[in-house]
Image (cartoon, rainbow, N blue to C red):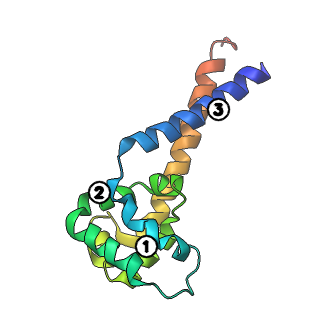
Amino acid sequence: MAQKMLMMAVLVILGTKMATVMVANPTCLQSFMYCAPYFNNATLQLQDNCCDPLKQAVATQLTCLCSLFNNPTLLTSFNIPIVGALRITRQCGVADEINGCIPGGESGDTDKIALTGILTLFLFLASITLYYGDMFPT
């Protein structure tokens, strides 16, 4: 019985991750490639090799970038912290464009992350209820 419950938990987690990765094909993700050293270190001065590709992506692939920022779990699945990514957009001067496509702007980011966690918990609890629902007759 413990094995079945563990297997169900793993399936729910894998299903959530797979659905997240399959939602978008983030071709614009490459624009963040040179920004990797700056995500977790706010003291480093941004170089042009980080900002220039990001500015180019904002100019040509804004829809793709918006889909990344509107799905924080997708960014974190590629080890890009949402807070660091938003800070870099501010420092590169493209925050207005990015915030324009995020419902609620920067203030909504933590709400989205919390909502993702709550939805995952709900899916997990629903799967347990469905699995054990007919084991305990009422």
Three-letter amino acid code of the residue under disc 2: Cys
Instruction: Give left or right: position of 12 versus 22.
Output: right
Relative to 4, does residue 73 appear above or below in the rendering? Answer: below
Instruction: Give left or right: position of 96 versus 82.
Output: left
Instruction: Give left or right: position of 119 versus 8.
Output: left
Question: In the picture, which quadrant includes the N terminus?
Answer: top right
Q: Residue at position x 46%, y 72% from top? A: 35
The dot on residue 86 is 1
Three-letter amino acid code of the residue under disc 1: Leu
Give residue 92's position: percent from left, percent from top: 36, 82
Which label's residue is closer to the chain start, 1 or 3?
A: 3
Q: Which residue is mark 3?
A: 10
Binning the other alpha carbons within 10 Å of mark 1 as few (below 14), some (14 to 19) or many (20 upward) gives: some
Secondary-structure class at tag 1: helix
Q: Residue at position x 49%, y 52% from top? A: 73
Of badges 1 and 2, the one in the foreground is 2
Instruction: Give left or right: position of 112 versus 128.
Output: left
Q: Find the distance from the CA under tag 2 to the CA under tag 3.
A: 30 Å
Q: Find the distance from the CA under tag 1 to the CA under tag 3.
A: 31 Å
Three-letter amino acid code of the residue under disc 3: Val
The dot on residue 64 is 2
